[in-house]
Image (tube, grey):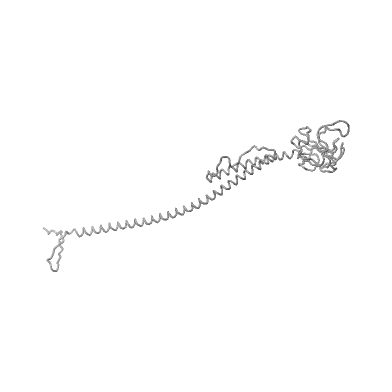
Amino acid sequence: MGRKKDSKICIMIIPHTEKVRRLTIPRWLPKASIISLSAVLIITFLIFNNIYSSRTNLEKEYDNRVSEINYLEEENRKKEIELSKLKSQNKELYAKANEVEDKLIEIEKLQRQLEKIAGLKSSSRGGRIGNGINLEALEPINEIQVLKEVLDNKEKELQIFIDDLEKRFEYLETVPDLWPTRGRLTSVFGNRRNPFGRGFRFHHGIDIANSTGADIWAAGKGEVVFSGYKAGLGRTIIIDHGNGYKTVYGHNSKLLVDKGKAVEKGQIISKMGSTGRSTGSHLHFEIHKNGKAIDPLTVLK
C-alpha cells in the first residue's frame, strides 16, 4: 500500500531561548483563509462600490432636486410678476368699466334728448352695465365677456336708434313747419272780411306781407307738383311733401322751380309779389293735410 498523504501542515517556531514550538494546522485552512479573505475583500469592494454609486446617485438626485427647486422658484417668481400684472390690469379694467358705464349713461342721456327733440320713442332699451351685474365680483375674463356683450347690445340698440332717428328726421324734413318767408302777418286762416267786396269770405291760408322780391322758401322737403299761373293766386307753386301734406305759395312775382323739381326744406323757390287778385305785395300760404286745408299756424314753428 502507498503512503497516505499528510493532511496537516506543521509550522515550527524556533525562538532563541526557548524550546522549539511546533504548530500544526490543517492543510485546507490557508486556502480557506485566502478564499474567505478574497470573499471579504470582494464583498467589501461591492459594498463600497454600491455605497459610492448610491452616493453618486444621491448627489445627482440632489442636484436635480436643487435644479427643480430653482426652476420652481423662478416659475413662482414669474407667476408672481404675472399675477401682479393681472392685478394691475384688473384695476385698469375696473376703471375702464366705470368709464364705459359713464359713457353709456351719457349716450343714453343724449339719446333721450334726441328722442325728445325728434318726438321719437325708441323701442329698444338695454346696454346698461348696471342691470344687477356686479363687475367686481366677476373674474377678469368673465368681466371682459360681460363688457363685450353689453357694448355689443348697446351698439345694436344705437344702430336701431340711429335708423329710427334718420327716418324720423327724414320725416320731419317733409313736415311743412318752416315759416316760408319773413314779414308781417296780415291775415289768418278762417272767415274774414272780403277785401274786394262786402261780407265775409273763408280764407284758406295766411297772408305774410313784405316788399316785392323778398325770398320765399319751401316750408318742407318735397316735390313741386305745380309751378305756373292760377286764377286769383297769380304765379303759384304747389309742393307735395309725400306725407299727406301739400303747401301752396301764391301771388309770387317770380317762380324759381319747375314742376317735378325736388326741393329741400328752406330752399328758395320764388320771389314775393302781388300777381293775381291781390291788394299788395305779400305771400298767400296754405297747408293741406290729406286733401283738406288746415290752419298753417297749427303747424308752423
Tell me: 216 left or right of 162. right
Residue ranking furthest to the left: 1
Q: Position of residue 133 (x, y in %)?
A: 56, 41
Q: Position of residue 57 (x, y in %)?
A: 36, 55
- Between 143 and 163, the residue placed more toward the observer is 143
Q: Position of residue 2 (x, y in %)?
A: 12, 59
Using the rendered view, name the quadrant where residue 49 is placed.
bottom left
Tell me: 77 left or right of 129. left
Tell me: 46 left or right of 287. left
Q: Is residue 3 above or below residue 147?
A: below
Which quarter of the rendered picture does the C terminus lie within? Answer: top right
Q: How many marks?
A: 0
- Between 28 and 184, the residue placed more toward the observer is 184
Residue ranking furthest to the bottom: 16
Using the rendered view, name the quadrant where residue 291 is placed.
top right
- Between 19 and 74, the residue placed more toward the observer is 74
